[in-house]
Every structure is written in C-alpha cells, then in structure tokens.
Image (cartoon, grey):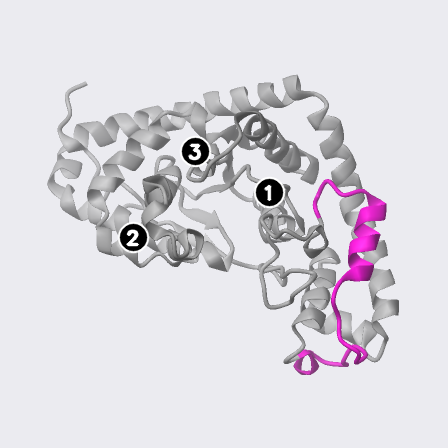
Amino acid sequence: MTSFPERVFSGIQPTGNLHLGNYLGAIVKFVALQKTHECLFCVVDLHAITVPQDPKELRQAIRRIAAAYIASGVDPAKNIIFNQSQIAEHAELAWVFNCVARIGWLNRMTQFKEKAGKDRENASIGLFAYPTLMAADILLYKATHVPVGEDQKQHIELARDIAQKFNNDFAESIADNGHEGGFFPLPAPLIQGPAARVMSLRDGTKKMSKSDPSEFSRINLSDDSDAIAQKVRKAKTDPEPLPADKDGLNGRPEAENLVGIFAALSDSTPEAVLQQFGGAQFSTFKQALIDLAVTQLGPIGAEMRRLEADPGYIDTVLRDGAKRARAIAEPNMAQVKDILGFIR
C-alpha cells in the first residue's frame, strides 16, 4: 500500500444548536490537531438535507458551525474551513462510491436504523446512502485520519472498505495511471479524550443531542453564563455523595457524566476529579462545575455571537476555504475519472 501524507478531515452537520458534546467530542480535538496535522474542517450541509430543512434556517446554521469552529480556536488561515456544498466533487465521488459499495454493507449501518426508525420505507434515499457520501468527503482529500465519536466509527470502517474495494477493483487501471499500491488511503478513526461521549444532563444513559426536546438536556455553545449555571444546577444526579474512586461511579450514569465533563473541561482525568471532590455533595461539585464551564465556554459563546453578527466575514472564510479545498478535490476527482475510463 502506498504511503500517504497524514491529513485530517472532519465535519459537523448544520442542524440544531452546537452543544457541549459537539465541543468536547469534536471541536476540542480539531483545535489540538491543527498543531500537528494538515486539516480540513467541513460544514457538511449536503448531509443535513437527508431530512427536511428550512432553507433560511439552514443558511444560518451553516454560518453558526463555521463561527463555532473559529470561536473555539480553529485558525481559518492555517486550516481549511468550508461548507461541503461548494465543492461539487463531494457529490460526484459519492455517486462513484454508490457504485462501489454494496447494499448489504449499508444495510448493516446502525445509524440509519436508528434515524429511520419504524418508518424505514418513508426515509430518504439520501439518509440510507449517507455513509457513501461520508466516505467521499474523507477520500476526496485522501485524508488519513478522521476525528469522530464512537457512534461514527462504523462509518469510518465503511469508508475503509470502500477505499479497499476501489483499490482492488481498479488495481490495473490505477497502476496504468501511475498510482502504484492503491489510489485511496485507508482512513483511521481518531477517538480520544475522557469525554468523547457526553451524555444528556437529564438522562445519563442517553447521548447529549441537538434533537432532544428538552433544552435542559444539553449546554449549547451559544448559552450565556446564566443559562449554563441553570442547566448544571438542574442536571439530574442521585442522593449519594461523589465517590472517592472511579469504581464508585458504576451504576451511577449521571454522576459519571458530570465527572467526565469536569475532567474534559479541566483537561484532567475522572480519577483526578474524584480525588479532589470525593465525598463532596453534588451541590458543592455542581458549583465548581458551573464556574469551570462558564470560564471555558463563556468566551466561546460570546465570540460566536459576535461572528454570527458579521455574516459577510463568515461567508468570506467559507469561500476562501472552498477555493483551497477545491485545489485538492479537483485533481483527485480528475484522476478517479481517468482510472474509471471516463473521457474528459
């Protein structure tokens, strides 16, 4: 297999408000990765329309994700920040991968089953084929690493399967076109950090979600200090004090979630948090968590609001990012067409 330069690609859908789970599970990693890797951070707006969207709200949501990237510390000069729909090659390569991937592979995707629910026959084809577009997003740039949450790991495995099958199916043509050892890399998922999976503040067994009807289930990045404090105070807990060690969190999902959030926001570990707060009542711990969350998230929310008030600047960032992304995408897609035997 050819050795590929390390490149990171990841994206967030512009649906609903970004929350603490998105920040700790994804954006914090983006900020760290930009120090060590060439990175592309995308607003995946083509994925958003797999379910109905209001066009005016979608336009605002695209800008909100871009604002969150920048406000959190992702440098638009050092990294490529863009929205997916500006690069036609995403959809073009997705069609190629629709012809490479097998229906049986997509039928095994658990996220489609969860999102479609019992009304599977009424779900859009886009929702079913979402993973092939995700594979195209990654492989269009020959990305080698993808920071994702546990729930997206299966999609990265599918992207690897698609890349491998393309490399195998067209091995002769790939070699004839001067690409010895395979055209696409096999991307690896990057799953790391103490709070890679942040749970609901109202139910520690469910993932924090933008679609949860309760605003008190999540802390939005756009929340002000008062909202953050109110949501932490109302977060579900149990009557027992915090344990002195991690084993004491077993069977206590809400306590485990709050400790994990504190650890992630303080760049610490659950063990260190429990060493500090073991034996304390939740009222004491929650106040410390409020102070920490307001200190860490308050400036991000304020900067997001400032950036969203200047849509012209955000649109300029996205256009510049799209121009830089296109410089990578166009030649890669042209080579795919050559490999497939298309005339251009």
| Residue 1 appears in the figure | no
SS of the residue at dot 2? helix
Whether residue 252 is situated above or below residue 76 in the rendered picture: below
Identify which amino acid the numbered label 3 is placed on. Leu
In the picture, residue 256 is in which quadrant? bottom right
Mark 2 or 1, closer to the camera: 2
Residue lying at 80% horizontally and 43% vertically, measured from the top left: 298
Q: Earlier in the sequence, mark 2 or mark 1?
A: 1
Within-10-Å neighbours for mark 1: few <14, some 14–19, many 20+: few
Q: Which residues are magenta?
A: 220-249
Q: CA distance from mark 3 to mark 1?
A: 28 Å
Kind of residue at badge 2: Leu
In this view of the protein, which residue sits in the foreground, 50 or 197?
A: 50
| Camera sees residue 32 | yes
Placement of the C terminus among the 4 image quadrants: top left
Indicate the secondary structure of the residue bearing disc 1.
loop
Tell me which numbered mark, 2 or 3, is placed earlier along the sequence: 3
Magenta span contains residue 218:
no
**Magenta span contains residue 223:** yes
Asked whether 171 or 57 is in front, the reply is 57
Residue that mark 2 sits on? 106
Q: Residue 35 — which label?
A: 1
Residue located beneath label 3 in the image: 46
